[in-house]
Amino acid sequence: MKNLKKAIELIYNYVDNYDPRTVEFSQRRQICFEKNFPLLFCPGPVRVSDAVKMSMLHPDLGHREEEFSTILKSILENAKIPFGVANNNNYEIVTIIGGSGSAANESIISSFKEGTKILIPTNGIFGEALVKTAIVHKLDVKQIDFGWGNSIDLNVVEQKISSNIYEVLMMVHHETSTGQLNPIKEVAAICRLVEEKFNSKIFMCVDAVSSAGAESIDVEKFNISFCSTQSGKALLSDPGVGIICARSSDLDLIRERKYQSGSKYLALNNQAQIHREKVQTLNTPAIGLAIPLDIALKELKADGLELRKEIYLKYASKIRLAAKEMELKTVIDDEQCMSRVLTTFYYPQNINVDNFHNYIRNKNIIIYRGKGPIAGKAFQLANIGYLTFDHIDYLINSIKEALRFSHIP
């Protein structure tokens, strides 16, 4: 017990005095050697820093106290960084501390009244999830399904949105089911042109759950009304906090139109209002998730988004080059349409899929199998989190070994 007390005191002291500006990206994860803790090569949850992990063991804290409001204020400021609007008063952050990225998306969708016309271009499971959520909330949904792994055709989107009066367009930025990076900037530009042509407001909404913090997003330049993400992916914290970057004027517009949210817990405007007025939350938040997120966002601020993007692209490029040498084919044909944090590969012929995955898991590596129409046909390798090139080399060598082990003569 004495040793435990000493260890906890050391952890408290480390976290209290931690300054991410003094620790390089590659040095932030030292504890938890891989033979005891799996290496995560999945698109979330991710490998977090020592400081983020240790901050889970925090002193007891009342959520209505000034100490928590100070933490929340820091989150609300720094969470603007991955959306490209740091120090921009035209946008504000709304948090759901105790909710996933799906909760953040539902918070956005449920903010519009029943019967609102919404256009949703899709090319994977997470776009399809937006459609299902909009149907649950009784919006008038039009889906444009381009098929898994296919690019979104901007001409088709323009034709559809120009032929009807849609109040909302919502789409996924990084379609994690395939690794496809969708053209939100170009679609938002189409929405702006249609707005001007018909003098009619279109709320451009984006699911950036697995891209915010890893890809280029500027919600103001792109003319985005609401953009969602969550803590446990490219923000490099533990999962469980839904985050929405909202244009303040559009929040006010929703309030003026007296849209009645279809959700109480996820009511976007109500949550935004208490953030504004009291720097507080509507309900008792998961404080144990807020503190790590605060540290993770300070780490992102210290690094800058460009450094993170550069690191992830180098990791992805190394994985893709090695995969080509192994003659693995990607689900997405054009590498320019891939994200920098995830690649989906087809299994080669004559492979025992279960043996392949069992071998990888026995190497203490976590990867994901394909979903939907590519289930049993493809697997995914993500490269988000506090990884190193040694980890990437270990992954590549393990994949090579697994392919040999699971080959069917």
Image: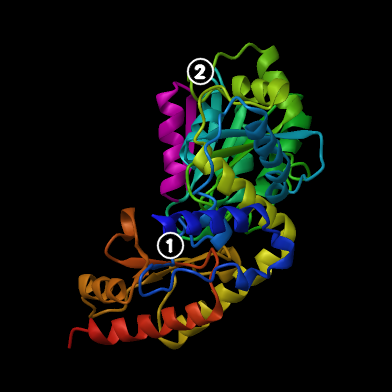
Residue closest to the far front: 2
x, y percentage for residue 161?
62, 34
- Residue 130 shown in magenta: yes
Which color mode does the image show?
Answer: rainbow
Q: 75 or 378: which is nearer to us? A: 75
x, y percentage for residue 171?
55, 42
Q: Which mark is residue 115?
A: 2
Visible residue check, residue 151: no
- Residue 242 shown in magenta: no
x, y percentage for residue 247?
72, 32
The Cα atoms of the two marked residues, 2 and 1, are separated by: 37 Å
Q: Is residue 33 above or below residue 223?
A: below
Say whether residue 404 is left or right of residue 280: left
The range drawn in magenta is 124-145
Q: How many marks?
A: 2
Identify the image quadrant of the C terminus.
bottom left
Say whether residue 380 is left or right of residue 202: left
- Residue at mark 1: 42
Visible residue check, residue 358: yes
Circle nearer the N terminus (2, 1): 1
Q: 314 or 13: which is nearer to us? A: 13
**Residue at point 52%, 31% (across, down):** 285
Dot 1: few (<14), some (14–19), or many (≥20) neighbours within 10 Å? many
**Residue at point 55%, 34% (across, down):** 61
Q: Amino acid at mark 1?
A: Cys
Identify the image quadrant of the N terminus.
bottom left
x, y percentage for residue 225?
68, 34
Element under disc 1: loop
Q: Amino acid at mark 2?
A: Gly
